[in-house]
Image: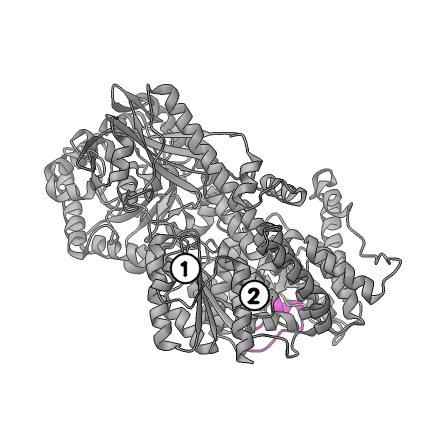
Amino acid sequence: MDILTYLKDNIVYLDGGTGTLLQSAGLKPGEFPETWNISHSDIIQKLHRDYFDAGANIVCTNTFGANSLKFDESELENIISAAIENARIGAKQSKGKQQKFVALDIGPSGRLLAPYGDFDFEDAVETFSKTVRLGAKYGADLILIETMNDSYETKAALLAAKENSSLPVFVSNAYGEDGKLMTGASPEAMCALLEGMGADAIGVNCSFGPVQLMPIVKKLLAAASVPIILKPNAGLPKSVDGKTVYDVAPQEFAESVLNMLKAGVRVAGGCCGTTPEYIKELVALSKDVTPVEITEKNLSVISSYTHTVDFKNRPVLIGERINPTGKKRFKQALLENDIDYILKEGVSQQEKGVHVLDVNVGLPDIDEASMLKTCVCELQSIIELPLQIDTSNISALEAALRRYNGKAMINSVNGKKSSMDAVFPLVKKYGGLVVALTLDEGGIPETARGRLAVAEKILKEAEKYGLGVCDLIFDPLAMAVSADKNAAKITLESVRLISEKLGANTTLGVSNVSFGLPSRDSINSIFFASALENGLSAAIMNPYSEKMLETYYSYRVISGLDDNCLDYIENLSNQPKSVETASADETVTNLGASLSRAVLKGFKEDAAKITKKMLKTYEPLSIINDYVIPALDAVGKGFEEKTVYLPQLLMSAETAKAAFEEIKLAFSGTSQKDKKCAVVIATVKGDIHDIGKNIVKLLLENYGFSVSDLGKDVPCEKIAEETVRLRAPIVGLSALMTTTVPQMEETIKILRKRAPWCKIIVGGAVLTQEYADSIGADKYAKDAMESVRYAESISNSLN
Amino acid sequence: MISVKKYENLPVDIGEILRYAGCKGQDEQMLSLANSCLKECSGILGYSVCFDEFPILISENTLEFPFAKVKSQSICAHLNGFPCAVIFAATVGIELDRLIMKYSRLSPSRALMLQAIGAERIEALCDAFCNDLRLQKNEISPRFSPGYGDFPLSFQTEIFKVLDLPRKIGISLNSALLMSPTKSVTAIVGVK
């Protein structure tokens, strides 16, 4: 019988701790326990046998840290084959009559994934894949991924297991005292991610004793439609006479776990500090417990690396602003690879209170797959909102879903066979809640019944992939009411029909309804309110529109969704009215003086407002040259003379940038004659510190350079490629640590070969003039201002 | 035994923060930036220390632990006369890195101030831990970290192996021997 069949009608017992037992058998601190599979196979076999004798159904191979980062190829193969063999021998020698299985145990890699560490996601997938392939080759019955404290690494391991074997996969995470993973995920978020990707059982291990893990287990039980695993420690460790002992005894341990079995846990064992005695006690105590049936929770949820958004708590607001359609400034940002602009769009929408960010970066002239992947990675590194990946390009969709740290919303599939054939396999593989547009080969049906029929067809096809109604959210398409007076009515009727007949969630791109009309907010907000009344679950909308937000908060009040009207009061009572306060004397000269002062003092918002006013009557280039640059120069000079501190210099630079942003917004698309030459900047490979580099970038941009920022931990080839592509006359390299300076030297060597024309500036905490000379740099800049001065001298010599 | 100790509410030295941020005086604008950053990160800082004690042997500029040996004049001089050493790793957690990452894209001045806060916080944590250690022992040496003097940074890999840091307190080591979370410290203290 295979493990999943057995699990259907039975409680499954796992084994207990390994590490503490091996230490008492003589494993030294710092020694790799996995090597004992070969050097002390008798001890390992006996350990497995003891657990089977105690009544465990599954023993985990002694392969927690068996990966290609620690062992070379042949060592790894020997360890894993020996480990599985040891478990098999343990099973054979055991007198236990229960069903016995061997799980290939996979623990964390020990490296932190990018962006917080330097381990690339695909490298992590490949590392786990090697272990999985060997486990499958040597005949493990299932895979247990355990003790993972990072959602992203957990995803990499699960993906590796799914792509390289057909074995059942159990996944267990180690949570912290705050009930979250070390990198922030809640139990519900892990459930959404892991179930979405098809884990066969999920749960929690290590960290604490059984009592402290109960709150986490309860959350998992409420959210999951798959069996829950519980594998706690024997309480907390303490040192008694130089020996480590745990404070929960077998009897007490078993009683606590028994309670959780009664509450619905289906797979139970022990982690650190537990021994065969604990498992024996647990098996004996729970022998009469009837396994609690596992029910489908039918939740429509998506998740980020921290939390879930549940569509039951409607209406869900999806910010529409990360999208180039009709936005010149956004297009320009995409073409210039200006990711910071896109991040700011994300953060501003988050501040407006949206729950999900739509991400659409489709533009004819860019590599959409690469750009979408980059934007998803960048957004999820600084914003905790779940993302809606919005593209019709299937390879871009897969690239983004693969890297997404959670369960994404997918925009979109439609009733055309080609669309469903392409999108549903990706939803099945990576998980996701997919927006289904009610159109097909015959176009958009003109009636609500017609749109319902397309929705039914899509649902039927989704079911073939094992997806259900909770994995879909239907979009019955808001059409311009200016083109057809009945358009809005039909859409509203479709929303109602689909939610009533299919019990499905619905979403609309609300703003489309007002296309071609003046004062669009008025139409949009009333249409939004009507759609909500007809059962709409989510809206893709403009969160900068006050009317839309007023509609949203008001609707929640009148529908009884806002307890004590708290959200309404919090969000709408202090709305700043955008009334222009006319100052007494707004001559250009006065405004200019105020702008200079704002830059000097670092008043960002003032600078943006003043610039906006000045643009009505004043040449943009003059605003920059007459007011912004002189103020910046004064601050820069103060910094060089040590009367201005670095944070002050930065605040002024950010303020100048805010002024430039207004100018860009007004003049995007037009050529900017004032741009100085291109500068490529990067933090070199291996180094994840980028604050210094970002400071230099900000100041260079202030002084009109066109900066291509490649980020941190950048391989030398990539820096060379970009320099060649832009034929950039200047390259700036940053490194913080002595260990990464050799990478800087390597990068310079390659640049000299491939881009002999460029001048190279280096900087960073450990660098000195001598060091810079020894690695062949053209310039050592001790701070950002010095970089700017040097870049200006190069730029001048080019003209 | 590897132990983990948590701290809470370590007192803040705002002067130190400003010093780390490169400010010499207590300028009002800088003070308000520092306070606003402190407020933003107050809820997300966690203070964890993971440590264990080992007997040591010193001879001919070689320091020997039960699990590893290292040749370094400076660490040997530093621990001379101590029969044992505590190895510890301290961190204020990954959330601060996330905040710094966010502001390094949105507002470098804030990112810089948050960096300075992180530097002050991790030092405060190390000090608090060493003060506790001083109370428990007869005598302790000042702390000494890999990378100081001729004590090689590569000793980090040994510390990581023996303290099981990724699992115990969520610190990991990258290929260039840098730690994540970035505001983390490993160090060795001689104890009697």
User: Residue B17 placed where, x, y %?
Assistant: 54, 40
Q: State the image quarter where residue A475 is shown.
A: bottom right
Start and end of the magenta stretch?
A435-453
User: Residue A316 placed where, x, y %?
Assistant: 63, 53
| Nearer mark to the viewer, of 2 and 1 | 1
Was residue A436 drawn as part of the magenta stretch in this picture? Answer: yes
Of all chains, the one bearing label 1 is A
In this rendering, the answer to whether B139 lies above or below A119 is above
Say yes or no: labels 2 and 1 on the same chain.
yes
Of all chains, the one bearing label 2 is A
Label 2, residues with CA under 10 Å away: few <14, some 14-19, many ≥20: many
In this rendering, the answer to whether A17 lies above or below A755 is above
* The C terminus of chain A - image quarter: bottom right
Residue drawn at point x = 55 percent, y = 33 percent = B12
Q: Is residue A383 visible?
A: no
Q: Gap in Å between the C-alphas at discs 2 and 1?
A: 21 Å
Q: Helix, strand, or loop for circle 1?
A: helix
Residue A769 circle label: 1
Q: State the image quarter where residue A274 is shown.
A: top left
In this rendering, the answer to whether A120 lies above or below B21 is below
